[in-house]
Image: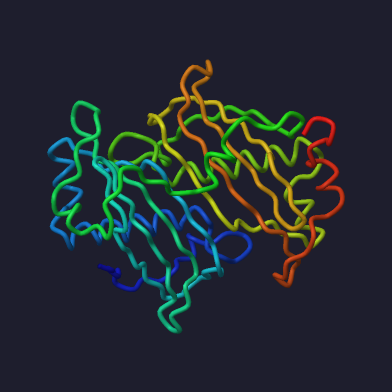
């Protein structure tokens, strides 16, 4: 079963300095589609909230195919493709209404958390709506490999951040889409730390648009909580660059989230081009330590 949201327009506030929809906004749109899908099955998130049940993000993923721009009329299509005993997988598409172009695709693994903080069994109406029953749900085939140990010699940067109220939601925890803005902050500081701030890269006519983004949520962050984020570059291709992000408590004892972004390299015309030599020089993993 495919459910489609009512059409909506890309707002100016949802675009960035490059004139396209900011990549983190897509996850808010995925949520719009998710809630619309659940309501068609008679599952309303506000009613669950009143029962002390939280629809929580376990993993989120997006693949960006073509940019959405200001005033585009778009819709989100949603399917419930897999159901496990305590987790469901929703797959999404952002579609431009005028010509039917698919601008991005996504996957969201969701769980229901009860008042005691434990995952609950998936309700019968969701199990019945799933296209497939499985024992385990995997949102990204790349995640486990990319989020393993950082290769020796890979560039890394650590920073501390505090959760702002603007980054939380009504459930009293950091909103799942906020993590992608933190990932961007980590990328900016890592490139700056090696003498290549994003602003300098862009002045040369080189862009690093996000092609894929993924986050695995392990433990919630609360308002005003301070956390540590480590950003690394574990993989570098001819025209692609991969960043990973790990979020932990300040003492490093609790792993809170982990994710990655994969970036293409393009010129001002949007065409793919090889990564500049100085990016390769600063971020390539030394052969003797790889």
Decide: is 14 above or below 122: below
Q: Residue 211, how many percent across, how many down?
A: 59, 58
Q: Residue at x 60, y 41 (%)?
A: 185
Please, is residue 264 above or below residue 51 in the view? Answer: below
Q: Is residue 180 left or right of residue 82?
A: right
Image position, residue 53 (x, y; %): 19, 38
In the rendered structure, the answer to whether residue 171 lies left or right of residue 155 reads left
Q: For residue 107, which quarter of the picture?
A: bottom left
Quick check: 41 above or below 285?
Answer: below
Coloring basis for residues: rainbow
- Residue at the image point whose x is 37% and y is 46% from the top: 137
Percent x, y for residue 259? Answer: 53, 41
User: Eyeballing the image, is 270 above or below 85?
Assistant: below
Q: Nearer the viewer, residue 244 or 135?
A: 135
Q: Quadrant of the N terminus?
A: bottom left
Q: Quadrant of the C terminus?
A: top right
Name of the residue lying farthest toward the bottom: 99
Q: Pinpoint residue 173: horizontal percent, then vertical percent.
A: 35, 34
């Amino acid at each position: 079963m495919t459910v489609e949201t009512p059409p909506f327009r890309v707002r100016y506030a949802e675009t960035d300095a490059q004139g396209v929809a900011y990549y983190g906004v897509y996850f808010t749109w995925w949520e719009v589609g998710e809630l619309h899908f659940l309501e068609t099955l008679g599952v309303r998130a506000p009613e669950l909230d009143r029962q002390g049940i939280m629809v929580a993000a376990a993993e989120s993923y997006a693949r960006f195919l073509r940019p959405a721009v200001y005033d585009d009329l778009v819709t989100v299509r949603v399917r419930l493709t897999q159901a496990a005993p305590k987790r469901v997988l929703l797959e999404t598409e952002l579609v431009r209404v005028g010509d039917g172009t698919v601008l991005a695709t996504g996957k969201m693994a969701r769980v229901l958390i009860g008042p005691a903080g434990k995952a609950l069994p998936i309700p019968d109406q969701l199990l019945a709506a799933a296209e497939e029953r499985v024992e385990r749900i995997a949102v990204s085939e790349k995640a486990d490999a990319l989020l393993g140990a950082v290769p020796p010699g890979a560039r890394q940067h650590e920073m501390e951040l505090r959760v702002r109220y603007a980054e939380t939601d009504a459930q009293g925890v950091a909103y799942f889409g906020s993590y992608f803005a933190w990932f961007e902050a980590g990328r900016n500081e890592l490139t700056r730390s090696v003498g290549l701030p994003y602003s300098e890269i862009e002045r040369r006519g080189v862009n690093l648009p996000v092609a894929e983004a993924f986050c695995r949520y392990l433990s919630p962050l609360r308002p005003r909580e301070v956390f540590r984020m480590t950003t690394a570059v574990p993989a570098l291709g001819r025209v692609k660059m991969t960043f990973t992000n790990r979020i932990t408590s300040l003492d490093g004892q609790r792993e809170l989230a982990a994710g990655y972004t994969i970036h293409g390299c393009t010129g001002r015309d949007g065409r793919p081009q090889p990564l500049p030599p100085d990016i390769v020089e600063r971020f390539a993993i030394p052969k003797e330590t790889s």
